[in-house]
Amino acid sequence: MNGIINIINRELRLVRRSGYEAFMPLIYLVIILISFNIAVGYISTNIIKTIIPLMIWLSCLLVCVMNIESMFKEDYDDGSLEMSITSESNQLDFILGKILAHWIITSLPIVIFSPGLAILLGVSHGATSVLLTSLFIGTLAMSFIGGVIGGLTVSLKRSKILVSIISLPLYIPILIFGTSAVNNYNANLGYDTELILLTLILLIFLIISPYLCLKSLKISLD
């Protein structure tokens, strides 16, 4: 556990040194929401309120996809990745720390600030709470999936297109369940099933992703 916390703290220190890059996820979210509101300003306000959660979810998805490539890239370039993976004592701690740090840096800011933005744009408090829950579970699942993809592509140059091709089909079900939960709440329908499915996806990848990621990193390093 201490190894995981140490990895997360190290990644957070690196982000703080990078300056403005720490705010990029929020900048993406604000740009997408502002552009969307300008583009569809003529549409009924009620329709816009139902689409706002989808826009927030799309922002999370895009940020996750764009940052998968960098999850292990710096460690690969400076040679520390091979040392961490070949070490017998902290392999899984290293991987879990990197995945959780990726989520904290790229997705958690959106998860924290999106409810406030949603309420400002007219989304109800109840729908916002469902949105927050689905984002918390869904973005964690996407980061664990992204860890495996990042491990597979870490040794490739200009792998963003390949990362997108691999990750999007895996992320779409999470996007569907997350937005469906909010839409069902707005329609006075049950949304528990969608949240349960999101949790199930998270639990599955929480269990298997560290081992798949370790295997994919070893393949990339061979």
Image (cartoon, helix red, strand yellow):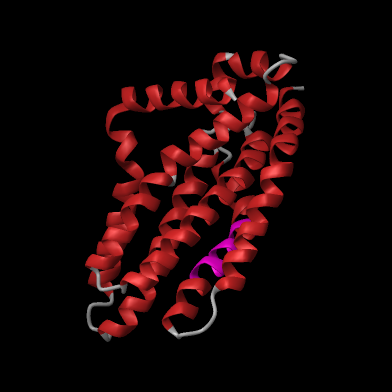
Q: Is residue 70 left or right of residue 112?
A: right
Q: Is residue 49 magenta?
A: no
Q: Is residue 49 left or right of residue 76?
A: left
- On screen, 132 above or below 39? above
User: Where does residue 204 sit, x and y in percent of width and height?
Assistant: 71, 51
User: Where does residue 135 sit, x and y in percent of width and height?
Assistant: 47, 57
What residue lies at 57% left-to-right and 26% top-to-bottom?
Answer: 4
- On screen, 117 above or below 96? below
Quadrant in which the C terminus appears: top right
Inspect this view and state whether residue 77 appears.
yes
User: Where does residue 109 sit, x and y in percent of width and height?
Assistant: 36, 45
- On screen, 77 above or below 132? above
Q: Which quadrant would residue 131 be assigned to in this image?
A: bottom left
Looking at the rendering, the stretch of residues picked out in magenta corresponds to 170-179
Q: Which quadrant would residue 153 be assigned to in this image?
A: top right
Inspect this view and state whether residue 173 appears.
no
Viewer-side residue, 198 vs 1: 1
What residue lies at 32% left-to-right and 22% top-to-bottom?
Answer: 17
User: Where does residue 9 sit, x and y in percent of width and height?
Assistant: 45, 23
Viewer-side residue, 187 vs 212: 187
Quadrant in which the N terminus appears: top right
Q: Is residue 200 left or right of residue 194?
A: right
Question: Is the stretch drawn in magenta largely helix, strand or loop?
Answer: helix
Viewer-side residue, 196 vs 97: 196
What residue lies at 37% left-to-right and 28% top-to-bottom?
Answer: 15
Q: How many numbered circles does the render carry?
A: 0
Viewer-side residue, 64 vs 99: 99
- On screen, 33 above or below 72? below
Q: Is residue 178 magenta?
A: yes
